[in-house]
Amino acid sequence: MLEHGGRLRAAAQRHGIALGDWLDLSTGIAPYGWPLPPVPASAWTRLPEADDGLEAAARDYYGAPALLPVAGSQSAIQALPRLRGRSRVGVLAPAYAEHAAAWERAGHELLQLDAEEMDRQVDGLDVLLLVNPNNPTGRRFAPAQLLAWHRRLAARGGWLLVDEAFIDCTPQHSLAAYCDRPGLIVLRSFGKFFGLAGIRLGFVLAEPALLGRLDELLGPWTVSGPARALATALLPDRRGQGEQRRRLSADGRRLAELLSARGWPPSGGCALFQWCSDPRAAALHEFLAAQGILTRLFQAPLSLRFGLPADEPGWARLEQALHAFKEHSA
């Protein structure tokens, strides 16, 4: 299993700090949401059905012509490589590591690329895969550039696969509206923006023929009834989404300013996280963990990703710990 953020129980055991005493900043998941609607009893007692309004609500929210609900975008990440014969796959690096692992596991030829190499390499690829904005670097790719790469790939039967897990605060940069074009596949994560990671819900946006093949591969009832009911209620809530978008965007800026003021100017980021590439990253990671603050450490390049604190005590605790590290390192 690859390492991910959110392994709070392991950190609590390692450092001998009670689970409830941690400030978990190790993920890029919204640390707050808004009041949840009640889940109908029938969602628990009946098998899920596809005509319950979820797909229509999601198409409206994402602005996508066609989509498929899945049990978290992770399930699609693992399944999509099985829908192609052996291919030459270019993957943005560094990025969410499950993408590369899934294509490699399925027997495809993998080429890890930095952002500057992509345009030079795209004509030699069958699949180009990237995260936009990227995780963990926060690197953004303009829709016009992505669509140009898609045209070059699709002309040869290739795919452009874009993971938009962190794009909900800037939906104007999404490729969702173009996903009826053959060879363009977009993944969206429900849990990150809505602050409901445990719901395990995502969506694949693509042409209907490909969605049908993926649906057949994944099998029936991939998304639970309660997850479908909650998402169907929340996706049309434009007021709640607008407030969430404003709050996350403001907190993303606040986190960047706090880190900069304490000697850790971000190398990149987005509304949901900030990323600091720094040779001191491992030392700060351990220092914070000893105080019950969990961050996400990356080795290549050596860097830290900070998620958002959920409340004012969390913000104060992070600021005090960063100040203490600066004094400790002086």
Image (cartoon, rainbow, N blue to C red):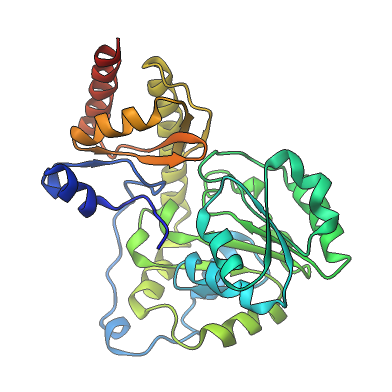
Q: In the figure, is residue 107 to the left or right of 155?
A: left
Residue 177 picture location, percent across and down: 70, 60
User: Which of 309 and 2 lies nearest the eye of the viewer?
Assistant: 2
Identify the residue at the far top of this view: 330
Identify the residue at the far right of this view: 155
Report the quarter where the N terminus lies.
bottom left
Residue 119 picture location, percent across and down: 80, 45
43 w.r.t. 124: above or below: below
Report the quarter where the C terminus lies.
top left
Q: Confirm whether residue 78 shows in the render.
A: yes
269 w.r.t. 261: above or below: below
Q: Confirm whether residue 67 shows in the render.
A: no
Q: In the figure, is residue 225 to the left or right of 168?
A: left
Classify residue 41 by image quadrant.
Answer: bottom left
User: Which of 29 and 102 lies nearest the eye of the viewer?
Assistant: 102
Residue at 32% over, 82% down: 43
Residue at 24% over, 24% down: 321
Residue at 34% over, 44% down: 26
Residue 297 picture location, percent across and down: 39, 40
Residue 240 picture location, percent across and down: 41, 51
Residue at 44% over, 51% down: 193
181 w.r.t. 217: above or below: above
